[in-house]
């Protein structure tokens, strides 16, 4: 994974032809990702007009599609599928703290005792 | 002294320095937007049931802007790929298209923002609401008393139709102009007497002759929690779009001179600015469903 073909900076001259060929291959992938993102957007919009039984289900489905789209952008456009180890370590730390931050609202739950949606969310923690 | 490792990878990281730099910056950006997303979650789950608006934003415009950003994400990566393949004129084309997409995005956003500032809801003494866009309002000569307000929109007795137009989208309402006299609008202090729920904070400048604030709400960020977090999140995002457009525009224009002297370094600059741009797209991929659709 850490071996970086796609954009080894300062590639030596004998690598240059190989490098260009590799970029050419990548361009095809970029176009595929582009179409996938377009289709993903349309599916997200259409899915929001379908009732999946509860608002929570609709939210889960929309966020799932968004996560797949984000994965495509990060993986291909940002080249994360073949990046150096240092970047992976950095992002692992980032997403640990990012993920934790998404649940900080739990500590505010007693400030909003009347909210039914919060009751559902905090049930798991009691 | 030359800046080290602008082209050559550092032995220990295997990367040119700017790439480590941009990823560190993006990590801090993830936390910045993460903090605001976290606030959004707290505001939303903490909102009184039935008070969080749905369907206040224009989905076709939001979808159009999503597509615009996706297109720009492809053009920015194609600009970099063109440099890698030694095709400078193609780079200029793709880089230019990226800036164009950024500007289209901002123009659409401006229209969306303006729409919120001109959208009002009025609670009348008969207990019905008029919800629509401001046509005109008449104040007294001193500018202190609201004589009448004219809105283009619809009338309803059910506040839920105003809070959640998405759910009630199949119900047909006649859209027309309503002119409501100031004397026909409920005072903020009397809302409980009318038996209506408060769905918005009143605009303090809209007063009757006795100086009472009237129940006239507006979708500007200061009168509603939802639009407050909407403007904060999308406003910060729009600033990123603007910042990205300036950097990408610079590399398209005067900054492109570096291609003749240090092509590899220039290519790396384009790659790093592209990484930032993809991040901006990535944030929008989450903002769009969260704010427009859910």
Image (tube, coloured by chain):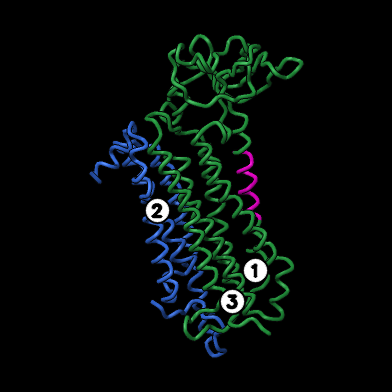
Chain colours: A blue, B green
Magenta stretch in the rendered image = B100-112
Relative to residue B200, is residue A46 depicted above or below?
Answer: below
Question: Label 3: how many residues lie within 10 Å, few (<14), some (14-19) or many (20+)?
Answer: some
| Closer to the eye: label 2 or 3 | 2
Q: Position of residue A26 (x, y in %)?
A: 48, 71
Identify the residue position indicated by label 2 in the image.
A101
At x 57% / y 69%, what residue is drawn? Answer: B272
**Chain of the residue displaying label 3:** B
For the residues marked 3 and 1, what is the alpha-carbon distance in whole angstroms? Answer: 10 Å
Task: Please name the residue that numbered disc 3 is placed on.
Answer: B85
Observer-nearest residue: A26 or B137? B137
Question: Residue at the bottom extreme?
Answer: A14
At numbered mark 2, what does the secondary structure look like: helix, strand or loop?
A: helix
Q: Is residue B41 left or right of residue A13?
A: left
User: Can you give x and y, in whole percent of width and height, for residue A100 in the image?
Assistant: 36, 55
Q: Are marks 3 and 1 in contact (CB under 8 Å)?
A: yes
């Amino acid at each position: 994974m850490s071996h970086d073909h796609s954009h080894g900076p300062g590639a030596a001259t004998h690598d240059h032809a190989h490098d260009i060929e590799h970029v050419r291959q990548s361009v095809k992938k970029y176009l595929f990702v582009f179409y996938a993102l377009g289709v993903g957007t349309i599916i997200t919009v259409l899915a929001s007009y379908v009732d999946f039984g509860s608002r929570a289900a609709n939210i889960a489905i929309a966020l799932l599609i968004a996560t797949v789209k984000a994965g495509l952008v990060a993986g291909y456009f940002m080249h994360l599928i073949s990046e150096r180890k240092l970047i992976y370590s950095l992002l692992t730390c980032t997403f640990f703290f990012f993920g934790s931050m998404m649940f900080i609202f739990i500590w505010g739950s007693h400030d909003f005792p009347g909210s039914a949606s919060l009751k559902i969310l905090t049930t798991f923690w009691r | 002294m030359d800046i080290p490792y602008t082209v050559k990878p550092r032995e220990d990281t295997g990367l040119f320095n700017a790439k480590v730099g941009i990823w560190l910056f993006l990590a801090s950006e993830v936390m910045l937007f993460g903090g605001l997303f976290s606030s959004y979650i707290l505001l939303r789950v903490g909102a009184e049931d039935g008070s969080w608006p749905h369907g206040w934003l224009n989905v076709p415009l939001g979808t159009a802007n999503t597509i615009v950003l996706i297109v720009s994400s492809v053009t920015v990566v194609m600009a970099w790929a063109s440099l890698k393949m030694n095709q400078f004129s193609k780079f200029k084309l793709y880089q230019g298209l990226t800036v164009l997409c950024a500007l289209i995005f901002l123009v659409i956003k401006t229209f969306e923002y303006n729409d919120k500032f001109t959208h009002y809801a009025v609670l009348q003494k008969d207990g019905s609401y008029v919800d629509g866009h401001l046509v005109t309002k008449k104040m007294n000569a001193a500018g202190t008393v609201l004589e009448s307000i004219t809105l283009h929109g619809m009338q309803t007795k059910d506040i839920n139709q105003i809070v959640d137009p998405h759910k009630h989208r199949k119900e047909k309402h006649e859209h027309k102009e309503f002119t409501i006299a100031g004397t026909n609008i409920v005072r903020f202090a009397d809302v409980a007497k009318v038996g209506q729920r408060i769905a918005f904070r009143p605009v303090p400048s809209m007063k009757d002759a006795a100086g009472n604030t009237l129940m006239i709400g507006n979708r500007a960020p200061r009168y509603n929690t939802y639009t407050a977090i909407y403007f904060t999140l999308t406003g910060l995002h729009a600033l990123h779009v603007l910042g990205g457009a300036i950097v990408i525009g610079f590399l398209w224009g005067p900054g492109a001179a570096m291609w003749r002297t240090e092509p590899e370094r220039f290519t790396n600059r384009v790659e790093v600015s592209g990484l930032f741009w993809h991040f901006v797209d990535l944030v929008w991929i989450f903002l769009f469903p969260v704010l427009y659709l859910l």
